[in-house]
Amino acid sequence: MTRFEFILVTAATLMVAFALGWAAHWLITRFTRVSQDDLGELDRMAQALHDAEETRDNAIAWIEQRESEFAEYKAQADAELRAAMDGLREARQESGYLQAQLEERDRQNG
């Protein structure tokens, strides 16, 4: 094989490879082309997803605000309960003390 024949065979091989690559590319783009209807549907889906995410974010913010309010309310109720229990404990102690004094006085008078 002479140098000229080698160059011709290499050039022909490269041309065939280029033609096959171009044909494959054309076929792939032809079968995978996205229509305008599909693009419109994708845009609608993207907008719906965006709206859903915004609604979700608003719902999460609302829930967090309610949880904060309820935690505040619970803390206040717990503080009031502790104060009431302390008052009840003091009242029971005072009642016990007064009852003991009455019993002591009854024994002395009795």
Image (cartoon, rainbow, N blue to C red):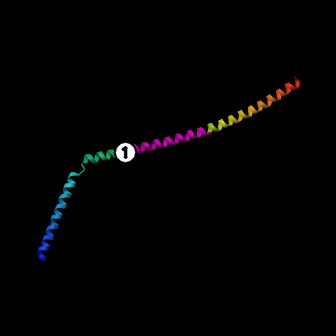
Left or right, residue 101 beside residue 58: right
Left or right, residue 65 beside residue 105: left
Q: x and y percent of residue 91 in the render?
A: 74, 32
Query: What crowding class fits label 1: few (fewer than 14 Cα within 10 Å), some (14-19), or many (20 or more)?
Result: few
> Is residue 61 covered in magenta?
yes
> Is residue 11 covered in magenta?
no
Give the vertical position of 6 relative to 51 (above or below). Answer: below
Which of 35 and 109 lies nearest the eye of the viewer?
Answer: 109
Left or right, residue 70 beside residue 7: right
In the picture as drawn, the residue positioned furthest to the right comes out as 109
Identify the image quadrant of residue 24: bottom left
Q: x and y percent of residue 48 in the render?
A: 36, 43
Give the vertical position of 89 relative to 40 (above or below). Answer: above
Left or right, residue 79 beside residue 40: right
In the picture as drawn, the residue positioned furthest to the top comes out as 110
Q: Residue at x 51, y 42 (%)?
A: 64
Q: Residue at x 14, y 73 (%)?
A: 7
Which residue is under mark 1? 49
In the picture as drawn, the residue positioned furthest to the bottom comes out as 3
Q: Residue at x 82, y 26 (%)?
A: 103
Which of 72 and 85 lies nearest the eye of the viewer?
Answer: 85
Q: Which quadrant, please, contains the N terminus?
A: bottom left
Residue type at tag 1: Leu
Q: Residue at x 84, y 28 (%)?
A: 104
Q: x and y percent of residue 108 in the render?
A: 88, 26
Q: x and y percent of residue 8 in the render?
A: 12, 72
Chief SS of the magenta region: helix
Q: Which quadrant, please, contains the C terminus?
A: top right
Which of 53 and 23 lies nearest the eye of the viewer?
Answer: 23
Q: Label 1: state its secondary structure.
A: helix
Magenta span: 52-75
